[in-house]
Amino acid sequence: MGVNEFRADINKALANENLRGALGRFGDAYVGDRERAYRNRDFNALREEVSGIKKYAAEHMEELAGRFTEEAARRGARVYRAATAAQARDYILKLALERGVKTVVKSKSMASEEIHLNKHLEDAGLDVTETDLGEWIIQLSGQKPSHMVMPAIHMTRGEVAGVFSRETEENIPADIPYMVNVAREKLREKFLASDMGISGANIAVAETGTLVMVTNEGNGRLTTTLPPLHVVIVGLEKLVARLSDIAPILEALPRSATAQQITSYVTMLTGPARAMDAQGKVVEKEMHIVVLDNGRTEMQRDPVFRNAMQCIRCASCLNVCPVFQLVGGHVFGSVYTGGIGSILTAFLDGMAESKDIQGLCLGCNRCKEVCPGKVDLPGLTTELRNRLVQKDGLPLSQRIILEKVLPNRKLFHGMLKAAAKAQKPFTGDDGTMRHLPFFLAGISGGKKLPAIAATSLRDLLKDTIKSSGGERRRPVVGVFPGCLVDFVYPKIGLDMVKVLDRMGYDVIFPQGQTCCGYPARQLGAPTVMAKVARQNIDAFWAGKPDFILTPCPTCTYALKKIYPELLLNDEQYASRAGELANITQDFSAFIFDRAEEFQSVAAPQKGKITYHDSCHLKRSLGIFREPRELIKMTGAELVEMDWADRCCGFGGSYAVKYPELSQQILEQKINNINKTGADVVAVECPGCLMQIWRGLSAGGGAGRPSVRHMAEILADSI
Amino acid sequence: MNSLTQDDTIVSGHWEQYNRLYEDFKYMAEAISARVHRVKGYTEAAGEIAKIVNELKIITIVTDLSPMVRELNLAVSLDGTGASVHADNLRQLAAGADMGISSADLAIAETGTLGHYADDMEGRLVSMLPPVHLVLVRTDSLVNTLRIALERYKDNVSSLPAYLTFISGPSRTADIERVLTIGVHGPGKLEIIFIDSPGGAIRGGK
């Protein structure tokens, strides 16, 4: 798909009120429903268990496939290993033709969607009916499922009534119970008369040859019971070693998928059970199991992407994704949708197919937090991006910035300083501008942006703040402000220094420091990040600070978590990266750990403050309590906004790449902020600050609420 | 199966446990729209079924061939209701019947779930096709969790039935606008009758 077509799809989805209403309402309800479903359950303990089971299975996939085949065969099933989608399709069609099958009923199977089975069978003249209500609606309307668990979630009852009216040639009212009954009656005829049933499976147990199906409607049981011939399509990733492995998965899957304790029906099939033909005569049941590879072996052999084999297809990653909630699965995904869809698509359909889709990930990490299989979707998406860049290269403009400008600190900072001067003619009276000069031009997209500061933090601070502690040596904090604070919001850096100085710390600003490199990694250039990582390590190593503090959670995450990983095999830098990571901390968390020192210098404040969680601070670093406690310590009233930890839509370069999506997500955030009636929105991230500032000032707001960094709020209380 | 032992002290201990499990089961099953009843023995069970048949205005009933259902002798005990009871030609009759009656082999308290070793085709047909499904289950077949229910196969995996079903509430869907609707392809009503002591008195009080 071309870039422009993909953008057109995004805009079409954003303009679809039905879709956004349905997905938005669902997304809001899901969070609470899921939490209630996990009440009395230790989710983290359960996900350890589930991910352990799935990880073991992924590591022993071939062995388990062999055992499964043996055991299922011993119980009378016929097992066929399909290397490709085509092999799977051909096997099933050949079987159907050999047995004289005319009509087929299907229960929901994503694997059958993946291999486009229906079309293949229908082209050969078979009558194929999807019996899951959602899938039937999709089939009748000639669409693709937009969600792995709820295929027709994008359609309204009115649209469904239209589809049913066409199918039945009757006037079907848009009444949901009525329409459900229409489906029951119409599909009942199909069940009773069909020659072949095709189903999927949620789990395949190697030890016993058992297939487990998790359903709610009852169509799965009818599909596997009524026709004398049953075909199961099961992907290799569904294998587990032992029968006892299924209980933890069955505890997690319904809770995460539909917020149910358990689904109406859990069916465990171990070989063929008895069947009756349409006349009621007991006949030998035939059960065929198609074990589908279609790219899974490649995924399993990949040391990084093997992690995705731990997916149990609950789709909770879709349900909490702010982008999925806006555009749905027809834009965000292929057969498999959302973030997990982009990873699966890369292996099942080929890397090129996921090129556009993977770009939709904001990197907000919400999916990682709720995944019962412990799939690191944001990490895998970054890796996918790296691979795509390795294969196709970066666009020229990005390549110049990332490979020539960013690693050359003097050039990079020289350009930023030049930009500060050159922007003057473009800067409005309020210190904002609409067009950034030079290579940064793409960032603004014509939107209001803060101007680059006349004097950067590095020039304001020079090297060192002289100790005011006399003879006694004070502990030394090295400040790593990150680009936005250094060049756009130097005041935040000065406020950090003010607070630290009053609390008894010396502050140094190593001039050799540069961008943390995270944006390069996000664009698929980890080697560029490694280059600047070494420069930053050199700069701080020379200064020998006791602590490194940053006002930017992404920089903290980079220094603390990514540098040690990135430089793990770098003999010269690995240990230094580790040592610096140990002394690196987020600014608020550092102050909170020294709350008594802070309170001894703070004076009580008034006002109402609401706090927005930055994605990296909350989900990558686990810090959300500390800034809130600090706000209360200042004497201000803390009022919580709805969905405080939902992304603001900034997402680094995301706001540039997908301004429409970023804008929609921002608008939701601004609504939630305005509802609190707070005077101030506190943030701990300069990126969120810029984005929320833009959102608040867009409405021509009279400066209330204002958005402020925690460093500013704390400095004001001193 | 957890059959009753001869030792009275153990028996009363068991019953405290089963009473607790039953209360948990009832709470969970009713939360997912099933109705749960408890009776002392078969005579009382037959009476309870007759009440339900009258209440729901059931005309045609299909049953499986399980020992529990046969013990009820429904053709006789439901005589007064006017409903007809069929245990044969199920492939033809079940889809048109108003109620299916079968027995379950175990009950899981934690989720209000019934376990059915459904290798027999009859049990499956009567539990899947009619709009009402009535299930008989022994109170002493209650276990706490699915994990415990599956543990019995741990050292004996070859004893797994070919078709093992766990049923939790009636059939449901939320595929249109996420509006919960009960009764799609399976039964829209699930009636569960626990029998404490086939032929005997209730133990340990209720």
Image (tube, coloured by chain):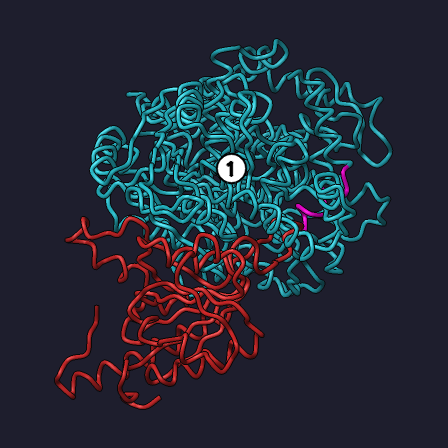
Chain colours: A cyan, B red
Residue A497, visible in the rendered structure: no
SS at badge 1: strand
**Residue at image x 40%, y 72%?**
B25
Residue at x-position 84% and y-position 48%: A701
Is residue A444 among what the camera can see? yes
**Location of residue B136 with respect to A61 vertically, above or below:** below
Residue at position x 40%, y 42% from top? A202
Q: What is the magenta segment's predominant secondary structure?
A: helix
- Which residue is the site of mark 1? A479
Which stretch appears magenta? A16-25
* Magenta stretch holds residue A17: yes
Instruction: Report the front residue among A381 and A306.
Output: A306
Residue A417: which quarter of the image? top right
Specify the amino acid type for callout 1: Val
Q: How many marks?
A: 1
Relative to A115, say whether A628 is above or below. below
Q: Is residue A52 magenta?
A: no
The picture places residue B191, in percent across and down from the top left corner, at 47, 71
Q: Nearer the viewer, residue A543 or A265?
A: A265
